Image (cartoon, helix red, strand yellow):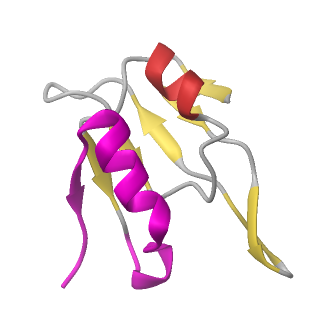
């Protein structure tokens, strides 16, 4: 993971399909715990996420971010999922 600011981290780049690159972002400054924005495609960053204090909340911005990793993140970290209707 790459530190962007003192309280913001970027996961490794994922390529869910050709021509698209994505990252998830962990904000460690939340009063209610760490917040993961978007989702990862693999568990490759789970060790770093754990080292940084885990994930209390995960926010998605679009249904295309939904996938099997949401369940893995919930089980691994106990993260509460937030997504648009």
- Tell me: 70 left or right of 65: left
The answer to which image quadrant residue 57 occupies is: top left
Q: Is residue 5 magenta?
A: no
Q: Nearer the viewer, residue 29 or 21?
A: 21
Q: Is residue 45 above or below residue 29?
A: below
Q: Quadrant of the C terminus?
A: bottom left
Q: Is residue 71 magenta?
A: yes
Q: How many labels were placed on the picture? A: 0
The residue located at (35%, 58%) in the rendering is 71
Can residue 1 be seen here? The reply is yes
Residue extending farthest to the left is 32
Name the quadrant containing residue 33. top left
Q: Residue at x 49, y 57 (%)?
A: 39
| Coordinates of residue 37 in the picture (x, y in percent) | 42, 52
Tell me which segment is drawn in magenta: 61-85
Where is residue 6 shown, x and y percent of the image?
Answer: 51, 16
Residue in front for this viewpoint, 49 or 85 = 49
Residue projecting furthest to the right: 18
Q: Position of residue 28 (x, y in %)?
A: 37, 25
Q: Is residue 61 above or below residue 49?
A: below
Q: Residue 1 location, x and y as percent?
A: 67, 30
């Amino acid at each position: 993971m790459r530190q962007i600011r003192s309280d913001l981290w970027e996961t490794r780049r994922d390529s869910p399909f050709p021509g698209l690159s994505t990252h998830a972002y962990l904000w460690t400054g939340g009063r209610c715990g760490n917040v993961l924005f978007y989702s990862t495609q693999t568990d490759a960053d789970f060790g770093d996420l754990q080292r940084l204090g885990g994930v209390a909340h995960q926010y998605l911005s679009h249904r295309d971010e939904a996938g099997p990793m949401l369940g893995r993140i919930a089980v691994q970290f106990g993260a509460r999922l937030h997504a648009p209707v």
